[in-house]
């Protein structure tokens, strides 16, 4: 079992000479370096947001995570384990190991961390009084090393995702077409102090829950879990939430929702916008709602001086969303994979 005493952490099965401990804010730069090296080795480029790293290590994002950093005898950071209590019955597992560690030691360390993650996940599920939980991890499509560890740890490849990006031009702030007739898009209502009106936040959550019911690995996420998780992202902004509606004989009905965040500046020092969620209710599909929401976020990004909009889409999307994105100018930057494993609570 994993035990924690004054910041030290014991993890069974690690190679000799290594030690684990709970991270602190001072570990931010070392973890950034580890993630940068891992991304470059796994997909050929990196884009680490230091603010997001710090938020997960010791900020608001750490509240729902159990974490460990592994060092060698000289104090060099070799690995990071993060076990995220994302929602009832779903635990996100991230195991990052330095790419230059010898293969045998790297595998031994990775499998020890996956075993520790399972114990944490079972403990989380037990606290939630659940009989089982899903372990949800991932890998870059070209990272055969990580995929081998996931297989050895009992995970199975469940899905492939396209990580897409679209350049944004300043002229698109005003040049994009309006929504199709009968479709309207508006930002969520806000109080005078800039905080959103609860009614609209709850409506966004309900529309997204109902929109994704027929999608891969759909699961119920409570409203508090949903809001808390999005608020953990340092790029989150309340004025990046939108609602779409369609006019019917019964009146205006909620038809779609869009939640975005701010992307860390790229090499040019320019921020981007990231689409965290875009969902169209089944009753409104085929009426141009998704295109209206996408035009909204592109125009908003242009007005804010951003140079790109990023998003993730299921490579086997049942709605054909990847085709829509491609037609609207998005291109695939790289691919990632979801790997799943179900575990029972003893």
Image: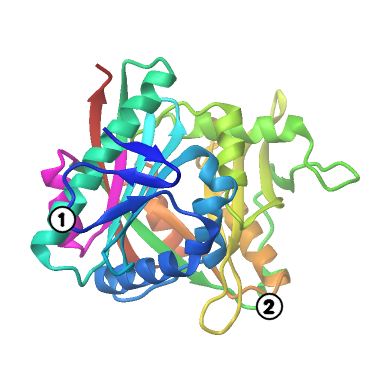
Q: Horizontal and vertical percent for residue 298?
A: 62, 64
Q: Secondary structure at mark 2?
A: loop
Q: Which residue is mark 2?
A: 171
Camera sees residue 282: no
- 107 sits to left or right of 284: left
The earlier-in-sequence mark between 1 and 2 is: 1
In the foreground, 199 or 126: 126
Image position of 119 (left or right of 203): left
Can residue 141 be found in the magenta stretch?
yes
Residue 212 on image: x %, y %: 45, 34
Magenta-drawn stretch contains 187: no
Image position, residue 105 (x, y; %)? 13, 60
Q: Looking at the rendering, in which quadrant would you find the N terminus?
A: top left
Instruction: List the residue tagged with mark 1.
Output: 16
Q: Are the residues flagged by discs 1 and 2 in contact, CB closer than 8 Å?
A: no
Q: Residues within 10 Å of mark 1 (few under 14, many from 20)?
A: few
Residue 339 position by quadrant: top left
Residue in the foreground of this view, choosing between 201 and 115:
115
Residue depicted at 50% across the width and 38% down the height: 64
Q: Is residue 87 above or below residue 192?
A: above
Q: Nearer the viewer, residue 168 or 108?
A: 108
In the image, the segment drawn in magenta is 136-155
Kindly report which numbered mark, 1 or 2, lies closer to the viewer in this rendering. 1
Q: At x 44% / y 71%, what residue is drawn?
A: 47
Q: Residue 217: x, y in percent?
A: 34, 34
Q: Residue furthest right?
A: 192
* Badge 1 element: loop
Q: Quadrant of residue 299?
A: bottom right
Count of numbered tags: 2
């Amino acid at each position: 079992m994993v035990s924690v005493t004054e910041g030290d952490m014991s993890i069974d099965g690690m190679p000799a000479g290594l030690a684990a401990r709970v991270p602190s804010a001072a570990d931010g730069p070392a973890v950034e370096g580890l993630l940068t090296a891992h991304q470059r080795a796994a997909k050929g480029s990196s884009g680490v947001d230091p603010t997001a790293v710090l938020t997960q290590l010791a900020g608001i994002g750490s509240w729902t995570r159990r974490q460990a950093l592994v060092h060698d005898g000289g104090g060099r950071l070799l690995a990071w384990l993060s076990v995220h209590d994302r929602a009832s019955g779903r635990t996100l597992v991230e195991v990052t190991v330095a790419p230059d560690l010898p293969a045998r030691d790297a595998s031994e360390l990775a499998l020890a961390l996956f075993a520790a993650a399972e114990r944490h996940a079972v403990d989380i599920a037990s606290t939630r009084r659940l009989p089982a939980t899903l372990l949800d991890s991932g890998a870059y499509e070209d990272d055969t090393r990580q995929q081998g560890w996931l297989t050895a740890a009992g995970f199975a490849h469940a899905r492939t995702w396209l990580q897409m990006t679209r350049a944004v031009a300043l002229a698109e702030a005003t040049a994009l077409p309006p929504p199709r007739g009968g479709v309207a898009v508006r930002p969520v209502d806000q109080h005078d102090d800039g905080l959103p009106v609860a009614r609209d936040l709850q409506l966004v959550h309900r529309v997204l829950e109902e929109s994704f019911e027929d999608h891969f690995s759909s699961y119920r996420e409570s409203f508090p879990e949903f809001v808390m998780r999005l608020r953990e992202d340092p790029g989150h902004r309340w004025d990046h939430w939108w609602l779409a509606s369609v006019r019917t004989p019964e009146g205006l009905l909620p038809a779609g929702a869009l939640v975005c965040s701010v992307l860390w500046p790229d090499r040019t020092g320019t921020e981007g916008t990231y689409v965290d969620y875009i969902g169209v209710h089944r009753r409104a599909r085929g009426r141009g709602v998704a295109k209206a929401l996408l035009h909204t976020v592109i125009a908003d990004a242009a007005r804010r001086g951003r140079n790109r909009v990023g998003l993730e889409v299921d490579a086997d999307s049942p709605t054909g969303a990847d085709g829509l994105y491609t037609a609207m100018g998005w291109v695939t930057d790289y691919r990632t994979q979801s790997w799943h494993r179900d575990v029972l609570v003893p």
